[in-house]
Image: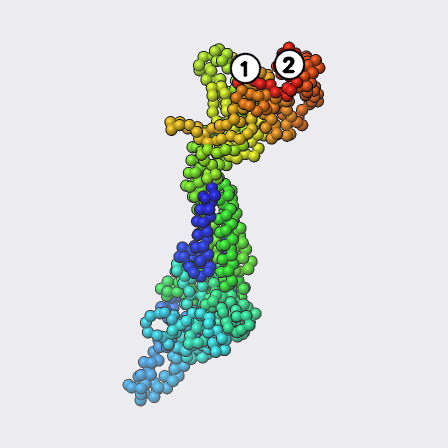
Amino acid sequence: MLRFSLTRIALSLLIVIFFLLQPAGLCQPTFVERMENLLYDTRLMLTMPGTLEPRIVIVDVDEKSLAKEGRWPWGRDRLALLVDTLFDHYQISILGFDVVFAERDESSGLKVLEQLARNQLRNDRRFLANLEKVRPHLERDRLFAKSLKGRPVILGYYFQPAGAGGEKLGTGVLPAPVVAFADSGAERIPFVLARGYGANLPELQATAIGAGYFDNPLVDADGVYRRVPLVQEYQGRLYESLSLAVARTLLGSPPLELVVASDEGSETILWLEALKVGGLSIPVDDQGAALVPYRGMQGSFPYVSAVDVLRRRADRGVLEGAIVLVGTTAPGLQDLRSTPVQNVYAGVEVHANLISGFLDQTVKHKPSYVAGIEFVTLAFIGLLISFLLPRLSPLWSVAVAGAILVITIKTNLYMWEKGNIVMPLASSVLLTLALFVLHMSYGFFVEARSKRQITKLFGQYVPPELVDEMSKNPADFALDGDSRQMTVLFSDVRGFTTISEGLDPKQLTRLMNEMLTPMTQIIHKHRGTIDKYMGDAIMAFWGAPVTDPEHARHALEAALEMVEALPKLHERFRARGWPPIRTGIGLNTGMMNVGNMGSEFRMAYTVLGDAVNLGSRLEGLTKQFGVFIIVSEFVKEKAPDFAFRELDRVQVKGKDEPVAIFEPLGPSENLDEATLQELTLYHQALKHYREQDWDLAETEFANLQKKAPELLLYKEYLGRISHFRSDPPGKDWDGIYIHETK
């Protein structure tokens, strides 16, 4: 399993490194960018207010207005009337035009009349006099300029992007720049560059209080408008957007300040952080662009039809004191955008959202340091999952991956809502999912195969719980031979021949299954491995294939539980008319050889060695001593908190070395007073027996037999005493009894 885990960890780390390339600026995978945009839009949709913003009103050149006033562009006299009506009748606070007036208005016919005055009617004094009287009313650009003068009106214009094709533009007059690089030292900031412009007529720009560019959002790869540059560079000067110009005018036209990060101890500018306007700080990215703080779907601001304003039918309560933007939603005028909140969205409302965000300080920010935070976050998540998931079960892996996702998303949303900070989310989510899928897939396709192999090899020997444990480290287990200290158990049915003679083959088969199944379950429960079934006998061992430091204790606990299970088994047998059964169990602990042994025709995972043979001999001695379980002194040493009755010191057939054997009575703390007294008397009698004090030993064993006449143990010693009276063992006898049978 170590090899498998290292493989999983290595694959995980490769994925982590791939994701770390993004915040390090070495790679920008398209799928991560798309996912980031999707998650940005989702957060925006879930958290935007969705309420109506009454401070900003949009005077809409809509289809209704075009139907009543004619096609766009309207005459400047109508626009002058619109301006006069908004300020004089509705008493608005400030007006911004999402429109450029780059060409002169010649719709009044003044140019034709002047041509007649110069030619055909040059001698008609009456015509010339009337022309001079009506000229002020026909000079519509001048009328419009007059309506702008002295009022807080911001005109619109546009820049030609630096990468745009076609002829370089330069029409109209630009407003005064807000920042000159010579004064700011901002040459290193990568502002959006413009190569040309389309601005307003000189007399209009001269009378307006200011102007701001429009129609220059930074479109993301998916074609969605999420960011708008608030300043753009043209010929070494910075110019402000329409939304920024309106907000700055509303605040009294304070100077625009660039909030920048500089080298410590120097004045070298590294990047742009924000724009400061009066008491407002507007966060921007390194290009001077701000994320549009969309309030909701289109219609988050009051809309008033332009024709209703001209005819004074608009609700005065809506317009009074409001910030007014004149724009259009008519499809034919091509001022519609694709935004995160709506596929078709009026461009003028984008400006309205920005102004609202400036005033409320709700513009989201993605500061430069988030790349460092993202790098640390990805490294932490990646390392945590890479080293933790290989150690966990599938269920815990799901729980851990889910918890990481929940914590990551909740933390991200907290920063979004409380700090107005846009932390990258896609990379963390995708990394977590990628690592989770890797580990689940690896576990299913690779480690599940290892588990199936382990199950195939050991499933017939060991319980499912041990198979699961082995599957976690399959490389640690093999069928090859090994030598280790283990404990072996032999169990046999007493009088099986007699039992089998009284049953037909089908009944005998059912009886054996009914007996072997619960016995096997008990062995498995205590982490034992079934070696084989030999008719009515069971051979099992502990300590392989899974190493078990408590192998002797577990084997002893299994043996005691097997004996305790016999009465319930007898009840079921009695109900079927079957005879009761008695078992003998022998346990021994020692060095054994374990492995897959056999021939090319059949192999078996088994144990061999003198320690195994001794266990088999001890099972055979249970008949002679009349006890259910006999264990060797080596088992007793491994279970010091159990109580034992020493049965004998024996030398079994095939063994040269004697061994002390014991009957386990259970945990010492569970013995009652009567049993403790009996053990004391028994061990005293056994002491006299080994000292060859036959009379005293006989008396004490006889007294014990009277109290427990069913025990063969006391009869065994009384028989030996009778034999030794006539055939003494000799003065050098050490109490060892030699058994000649198995």
- The quadrant holding residue 202 is bottom left
| Residue plotted at (46% across, 39% down) | 475
Q: Relative to 68, is 490 above or below?
A: above
Q: Residue extending furthest left?
A: 120
- The quadrant holding residue 666 is top right
Q: Amino acid at mark 2?
A: Pro
| Residue plotted at (45% across, 29% down) | 605
In the depicted view, which residue is nearer to us: 265 or 170?
265
Q: Residue extending furthest front?
A: 731
First along the sequence among labels 1 and 2: 1
In the depicted view, which residue is nearer to us: 737 or 409?
737
Q: Amino acid at mark 1?
A: Pro
Q: What residue is disc 2 on?
A: 728
Q: Assign a secondary structure to mark 2.
A: loop
Crowding around mark 2 (Cα neighbors within 10 Å: few <14, some 14 to 19, many 20+) is few
In the depicted view, which residue is nearer to us: 104 or 209?
209
Residue 656 in picture, x, y percent from top left: 55, 23
Q: Is residue 102 left or right of residue 563?
A: left
Question: Which numbered dot is residue 437?
Answer: none
Question: Which numbered dot is residue 580?
Answer: 1
The reply to whether residue 64 is visible in this rendering is no
The reply to whether the C-beta atoms of the residues labelled 1 and 2 are less than 8 Å apart is: no
Q: Assign a secondary structure to mark 1.
A: loop
